[in-house]
Amino acid sequence: MIIATTNTLQGKNIVEYKGVVVGEAVMGANMFRDIFASISDIVGGRSGAYENVFTRARKIAFQELENEAMSIGANAVIGVDIDYEVVGKHGSMLMVSINGTAVRYE
């Protein structure tokens, strides 16, 4: 499955537009991760715990996007947009939403 942020696929002929597809993942942050992230903020540096949550959420959302595209007969997704949002009480949840246009190419 080709997944691209562009609206065309270089060297490919798009023969059918299947529709908009979406992949989403909502991940909760836990107390221990928050404590370690706070310590990183104080001493400087990166928060590996939060980076891992972002990576896992993004991978899940991409997999859902691909699964949805395949289920409607697409072999590529173009015009992909990725959004990150903090949701929930006190920003306790991370949401990754990915959308694009499912297409068939030759």
Image (tube, grey):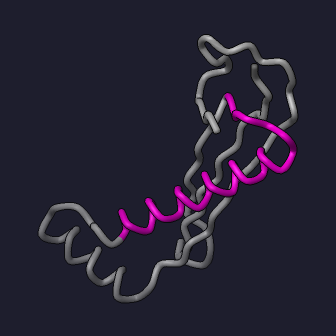
- At a point 73% along the width and 35% down the height, the residue shown is 75
Q: Of residues 105 and 42, which is closer to you in this image?
A: 105
Question: Residue 81: where, in percent of width, then height?
Answer: 62, 38
Quarter in which the N terminus is drawn: top right
Q: Position of residue 23 (x, y in %)?
A: 69, 54
* Farthest residue, direction left: 43
Q: Give the side of residue 21 with respect to residue 49, left or right.
A: right
- Quadrant (top left/top right/bottom left/bottom right) for the C terminus: top right
Is residue 59 inside the magenta stretch? Answer: yes
In this rendering, the answer to whether 21 lies above or below 67 is above
What span is colored magenta in the figure?
50-78
In this rendering, is residue 82 above or below 44? above
- For the residue pair 80 and 37, the one nearer the viewer reads as 80
Residue 76 lies in the magenta stretch: yes
The chief SS type of the magenta part is helix
**At which x and y percent is residue 76?**
70, 33
* Residue at the (62%, 74%) spot, across then down: 88
Q: Is residue 66 above or below residue 53?
A: above
Residue 49 shown left or right of residue 74 in the figure: left
User: Which residue is most to the bottom?
Assistant: 31
Residue 94 position within the rendered picture, expressed as x and y whole percent measured from the top left: 54, 66
Q: Nearer the viewer, residue 15 or 85?
A: 15
Residue name at image x 61 percent, y 22 percent: 6
User: Residue at left 63%, top 55%?
Assistant: 63
The answer to whether residue 39 is above or below residue 103 is: below
